[in-house]
Image: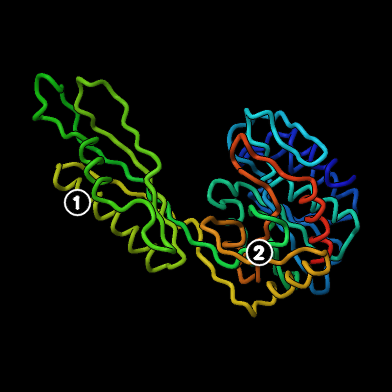
Amino acid sequence: MNAFEHFRELVSIPSPSWKEDGVSSYIMTKMAEYGYFLRDDVSGNLLFWRKPTGRKVMIAAHMDTVGRAVEPHMLEDDESFFTDGHTALGADDKAAIAAMLAAAEKKPDALFLFTRAEELGLQGSKKLTKEFFASFDIEAAYVLDAAGPVGSCIISAPGKNRIDVTMLGRTAHAGFSPEKGINAIKAAAEAVAASPSGRIDDETTCNVGSFMAQGPTNIVPDKATYSYEVRSLSDEKRKAITDKITAEANKAAERAGAECRIELKELYSPYIISETDPALIRAEAAAGTAGLEFRTHATSGGSDANNLRCLGLDTITLSIGYENAHSVNERIRKSEIEALVAFITALV
């Protein structure tokens, strides 16, 4: 099967995060046909190989897509795959999977990794361990998961924190005895108003993306929740902004006489790749072999590369050519999928 045929099959399989079993089964069936052995973990991440010894290049992609378990109504013409405008396409990251399967059918001595729940903050790859890869000599790893033309490489990506705040006040009747209540919405709103949001500097951003407190207007609300994310190339700046957000939550709670509960998750760490990085040098050479223009750029998003680099694997994120990911306008050119197969083949 060629990459286009794989892609058509894959996009017809719903695969929201942690519910990727249909895609997982498809991959396992095809890789078994191609003569690969399988190693998986308790989270459902999949690793395939043919030969246990020798230095390896590893190619990786994630199996989940954003949103609900809805099959996209895919359309295509001579140039592109796209949808009818009602759902996302899922080229992020099924175009990568399709290209990997097409390359794997040629039976290279390489590793192929497929992860779960990447769209929820790299949760699947965060479950991976050094022991999972310990029996293999991995020279370089490449995560296929970025916008931009094939031949582009990500040389820096931020780390990310998530902060979930629950403000607990005290309920009371808003008309008869409001002074007996503690308004959780007001306390939470004051905390958010005093906290940073938006672009902090050229390597740091933060955003409050959720604020929830439903209830009738005649009751003083006793609960409000909100959630932040903080991204930065600097661990120190990410910690400083996170500390500021949590401090403002605690101060607002104290002023109101409320209780504040904070859950902090360090989702992944940042990385910056030097020009002398061996995996980057290999990628540039492979791009030349495949006839592609080699480019490098930074990103403000994360990928499984953040977690794989923390395991000591020399990992680079590669662009795969999709456009408008996560939206109803998502599309990918067929020429980019063909280029990706050529790039993978040159890499391995």
- Can residue 40 be seen here? The reply is no
Q: Position of residue 92 (x, y in %)?
A: 66, 46
For the point 49% across and 56% down, the residue is 267
Q: Position of residue 9 (x, y in %)?
A: 80, 37
Give the side of residue 88 with respect to residue 239, left or right.
right
Give the side of residue 307 with respect to residue 170, left or right.
right
Q: Is residue 17 above or below residue 52?
A: above
Give the side of residue 322 with respect to residue 286, left or right.
left
For the point 65% across and 70% down, the residue is 313
Q: Earlier in the sequence, mark 1 or mark 2?
A: 2
Q: Position of residue 164 (x, y in %)?
A: 37, 46
**SS of the residue under disc 1:** helix
Q: Is residue 226 above or below residue 234?
A: above
Residue nearest the viewer, comparing 43 with 317: 317
Residue under pointer 1: 251
Q: Nearer the viewer, mark 1 or mark 2?
A: 2
Numbered label attached to residue 213: none
Image quarter hosting the N terminus: top right
Task: Rate crowding at label 1 as few (under 14), some (14 to 19) or many (20 or more) other CA atoms within 10 Å.
Answer: some
The colour style of the image is rainbow
Residue nearest the viewer, comparing 214 with 99: 99
**SS of the residue under disc 2:** strand
For the point 64% across and 48% down, the residue is 116
Task: Rate crowding at label 2 as few (under 14), some (14 to 19) or many (20 or more) other CA atoms within 10 Å.
Answer: many
Residue 180 in which image quadrant: top left
Check if mark 1's residue and mark 2's residue have beta carbons within 8 Å: no
Numbered label attached to residue 153: 2
For the point 57% across and 53% down, the residue is 122
Which amino acid lies under the numbered mark 1 shown in the image of this protein? Answer: Lys
Which amino acid lies under the numbered mark 2 shown in the image of this protein? Answer: Cys
Q: Is residue 189 above or below residue 152?
A: above
